[in-house]
Image (spheres, helix red, strand yellow):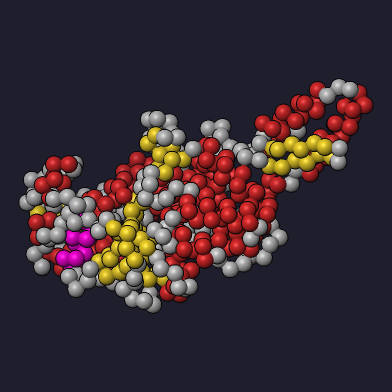
């Protein structure tokens, strides 16, 4: 499909026409999670955003011409602390939490990337890269640590647009006597006997966080690739440090050509925080938490895509209710419809800097015009209305037995003139989010916004 793709490059701060380095091979790298616990709702946003990018590139260039890498950090001080506190092994914790992440992301419609490397599988490559940086004069050993010398890379700060002095003033940098410059960052650090470690030329230790991503992307995508993505909280210092160490280790390449960063997530207009009581995981939403009804993964995805990735995204219960109602309506419309070709209008809007909100607006137009094959195909490009995402709707749609029961209660009330039971049952149905339609022809019950099958128990 010959559709121009425009992306806002964080590095140039401009919307640019995307032209892959290799016309036959689009290469994308996205920073994945540190797997020490359940993914919170904010973690789902970049996973969904870059899943849509992956789908778009596959649509335009062909599935066999796109490689998408999203890594796992499975060695980290947070994980180490969790292991020490729980008495469980690090391997056991990371195996469990990695699977949690994969399950939760699958539930919100995220396809598995081409490669999902684990950091601990690339220790040898990290050690080799660090040794190369030392040899080239970009890193130095000090008291069992190896640090990257920021002053050795003159372009440092180009991504975030700040000078080194500004970054020192505004950042919480680790003050350590072995650093030559406060901004120098750790590539390798020593491990005591209680911590995981690997043998290296600088003693037993473990890698710093930043070097992990550079080593993995180089091994899987090369010295230059097309797109690097992640949340905008990673722009500094993580992505800034990735650029510095990668360009110094592999000056023949340019590392990432295009940088994409999604904005952060809020809940009901406020920053998500445990202290505010508005912090929850994707699993919490999927299963229901603190007395709240479960939110289907497809609904979570729809809400996320309703806001452009470069704008702050506000999760609200009302948005979830509206998304659920829309999806139920659309699923009813396309249930027996053959999927058509993906409408070029949807692709073109999505290709304009991943405008998912605009693409959803196009889906509404397709629904209104009666182009149901196009609606089904266009929604599929966004990861919506797919068969694997519809189990939540199919399970909860059959309300025929309750409709028959209400019809029988109403018939009895017509005889006795006592409509109290009709009113009670109708109120309970409405409380459960069921739309009640009563006419001379009979009773029809339809799941509405906020439908909660659990509240129907006992009716």
Give above or below for 130 relative to 64: above
Please state which of residues 450 and 250 is positioned toward the viewer in this rendering.
450
Residue most extreme to the front: 369
x, y (%) of residue 303?
Answer: 50, 46
Q: Is residue 300 left or right of residue 168?
A: right
Residue most extreme to the right: 415
Please state which of residues 209 and 241 is positioned toward the viewer in this rendering.
241
Q: Is residue 378 left or right of residue 240?
A: right
Q: Main secondary structure of the magenta part?
A: helix
Q: Quadrant of residue 387?
A: bottom right
For the C terminus, which image quadrant? top right
Q: Decide if residue 104 is in sight here.
A: no
Q: Decide if residue 244 is in sight here.
A: yes
Does the magenta portion include 245?
A: yes
Tell me which residue sits at (46%, 63%) in the image: 348
Give above or below for 404 relative to 332: above
Does the magenta portion include 446?
A: no
Tell me which residue sits at (85%, 31%) in the image: 410
Give above or below for 133 relative to 163: below
In magenta, the rendered stretch is: 240-249
Tell me which residue sits at (32%, 63%) in the image: 16
x, y (%) of residue 235?
Answer: 27, 52
Tell me which residue sits at (74%, 46%) in the image: 398
Figure label count: 0
x, y (%) of residue 176?
Answer: 11, 45
Q: Quadrant of residue 371?
A: bottom right
């Amino acid at each position: 499909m010959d559709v121009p793709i425009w992306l806002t490059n964080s590095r140039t701060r401009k919307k640019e026409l995307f032209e892959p380095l290799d016309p036959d091979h689009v290469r994308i790298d996205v920073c994945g999670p540190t797997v020490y616990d359940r993914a919170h709702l904010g973690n789902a946003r970049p996973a969904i955003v870059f899943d849509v990018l992956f789908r778009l590139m596959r649509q335009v260039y062909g599935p066999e011409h796109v490689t998408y890498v999203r890594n796992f950090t499975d060695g980290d001080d947070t994980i180490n602390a969790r292991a020490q506190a729980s008495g469980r092994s690090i391997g056991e914790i990371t195996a469990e939490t990695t699977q949690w992440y994969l399950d939760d992301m699958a539930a919100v419609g995220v396809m598995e990337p081409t490669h999902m490397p684990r950091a601990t599988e690339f220790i040898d490559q990290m050690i080799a890269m660090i040794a190369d940086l030392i040899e080239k004069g970009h890193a130095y050993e000090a008291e069992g640590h190896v640090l990257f010398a920021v002053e050795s890379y003159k372009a440092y700060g180009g991504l975030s647009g700040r000078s080194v002095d500004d970054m020192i003033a505004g950042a919480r940098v680790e003050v350590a006597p072995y650093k030559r410059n406060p901004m120098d960052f750790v590539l390798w650090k020593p491990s005591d006997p209680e911590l995981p470690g690997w043998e290296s030329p600088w003693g037993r230790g473990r890698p710093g966080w930043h070097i992990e991503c550079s080593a993995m992307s180089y091994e899987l995508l090369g010295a230059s690739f097309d797109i690097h993505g992640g949340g905008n909280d990673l722009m500094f210092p993580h992505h800034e440090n990735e650029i510095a160490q990668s360009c110094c280790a592999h000056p023949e390449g340019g590392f990432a050509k295009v940088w994409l960063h999604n904005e952060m997530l809020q809940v009901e207009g406020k920053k998500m925080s445990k202290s505010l009581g508005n912090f929850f995981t994707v699993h919490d939403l999927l299963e229901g938490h603190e007395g709240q009804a479960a939110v289907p993964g497809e609904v979570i995805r729809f809400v996320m895509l309703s806001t452009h990735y470069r704008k702050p995204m506000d999760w609200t219960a009302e948005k979830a209710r509206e998304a659920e109602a829309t999806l139920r309506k659309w699923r009813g419309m396309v249930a027996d419809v053959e999927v058509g070709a993906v409408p070029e209008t949807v692709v073109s809007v999505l290709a304009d800097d991943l405008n998912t909100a605009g693409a959803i607006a196009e889906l509404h137009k397709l629904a209104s015009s009666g182009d149901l094959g196009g609606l089904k195909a266009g929604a599929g490009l966004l990861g919506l209305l797919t068969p694997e995402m519809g189990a939540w709707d199919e399970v909860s749609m059959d309300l025929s037995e309750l409709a028959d029961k209400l019809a029988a209660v109403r018939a009895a009330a017509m005889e006795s003139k006592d409509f109290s039971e009709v009113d009670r049952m109708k109120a309970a149905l409405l409380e459960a989010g069921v739309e009640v339609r009563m006419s001379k022809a009979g009773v029809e019950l339809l799941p509405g916004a906020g439908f909660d099958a659990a509240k129907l128990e006992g009716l």
